[in-house]
Image: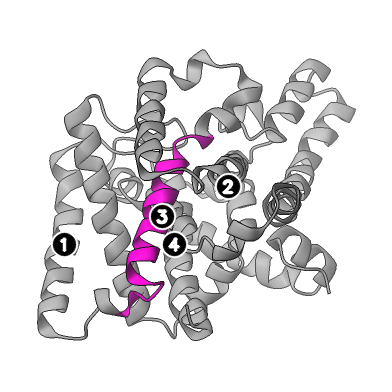
Amino acid sequence: MKNTLRQNSIDVYKGILISLMVIGHAAQENTFLFNFIYNFHMPSLAILSGFLWSSKHATTTFPIFLIQRFKRIILPAFIMGLICSIPFLLKLVKGNIEIHEFSIKVIGTFTGNSSVKYNFNCSPLWYLYALFFAELMFFYVTRLSKVLVALVTLLIICFYTQFKISEVPFYTVGLFLSFQFIPWIYLGKTISNYLNKDLSSLFKRDTKTFVLALILTFSLILIPLLSNSTIVMARAVYGANITEFTFHVLIALVGAWLIMFYARLYKKSSFFTFIGYRTLPFVGFNYLVHGYSIRLGLDALLTGVIDLLLLFALVYLLKSWPLLSNSINGHAIK
């Protein structure tokens, strides 16, 4: 993939999806805004992880891969978890929270629990922990035959059919949620291999492509008006039955294609490029910021937009502290 494509399209793609994530977190469940965003935003990010899966990993040893991904994903999650713990540490000192509750939040935060009951109001960090565990497993999945990959996918589906998030210990939630990423990552890698990492063949600049994009966009908007069912990857929910599951997978694929279409259309957007290159703090500090903006009592969409702008300002200001900024962004420390 060319660097310009990475910078202009991939980062804008990530920026759009992270923006939707922030807005989606401000919405109430079973509302149009919530269902519309959740229908595709998380699967689209997982597919991108597979699309960007480097061929270099095939010749990398597992210990080196583990260290690389730890620095890129888990170390930033640790740092942001520590920052989010400060208000709770002050509560502990003042006696406003019990040591037992604080301890549970410590364990939940640094193992990727997705419930605010078990973390320092930084639930979105579950995504980083789950992605980390999933990529470690995917390191070996890529070495399997297609038949075995299909079997692994079937086992994953059966696993989530048999167990629910409420049935596992709170400190294993991050691991529990990670398995669902593997089929999406593999799908992204398969698409990448088929296209030879070149997305241009999917997005011809002609009337037919624009008409198709408009029709699919209208469909994505219409679907949440007709059904309350949606994907909630933070709880590994994909619908009540196999029909809804299949339907949601198709919707997610449509959503991923559309977001990439718009990303290539607006590939010069500095706003989304900034977010796409610095996704991790937008994830880690999302709930921290939302805890203050929600006090304004505004509607969900406006609150989500305010959250996004506040996070943008926060991440931009962090650039003044390169060591901290690079650390929480998972970038190499210069």
Q: Secondary structure at mark 4?
A: helix
Residue 45 visible from this viewpoint: yes
CA distance separating discs 4 and 2 = 14 Å
Residue designated by label 3: 47
| Front tag of 4 and 2 | 2
Depth order, front residue of 223/290: 223
| Front tag of 3 and 2 | 2
Residue designated by label 1: 216
Residue designated by label 2: 139
Q: Residues within 10 Å of mark 2 (few under 14, many from 20)?
A: some
Q: Are marks 4 and 3 in contact (CB under 8 Å)?
A: yes
Residue 153 drawn in magenta? no
CA distance separating discs 1 and 2 = 34 Å
Q: Are marks 1 and 3 in contact (CB under 8 Å)?
A: no
Numbered range of the magenta stretch: 178-200
**Count of marks, rendered view:** 4
Where is residue 253? Give x, y as percent. 27, 54
CA distance separating discs 4 and 3 = 6 Å
What's the amino acid at mark 2? Phe
Where is residue 83? Give x, y as percent. 78, 47
The disc at residue 51 is 4
Query: Eyeballing the image, is 308 above or below 110?
Result: below
Depth order, front residue of 119/334: 334
Could you tell which of marks 1 and 4 lies nearer the N-terminus? 4
Could you tell which of marks 3 and 2 lies nearer the N-terminus? 3
What's the amino acid at mark 4? Phe
CA distance separating discs 1 and 3 = 19 Å
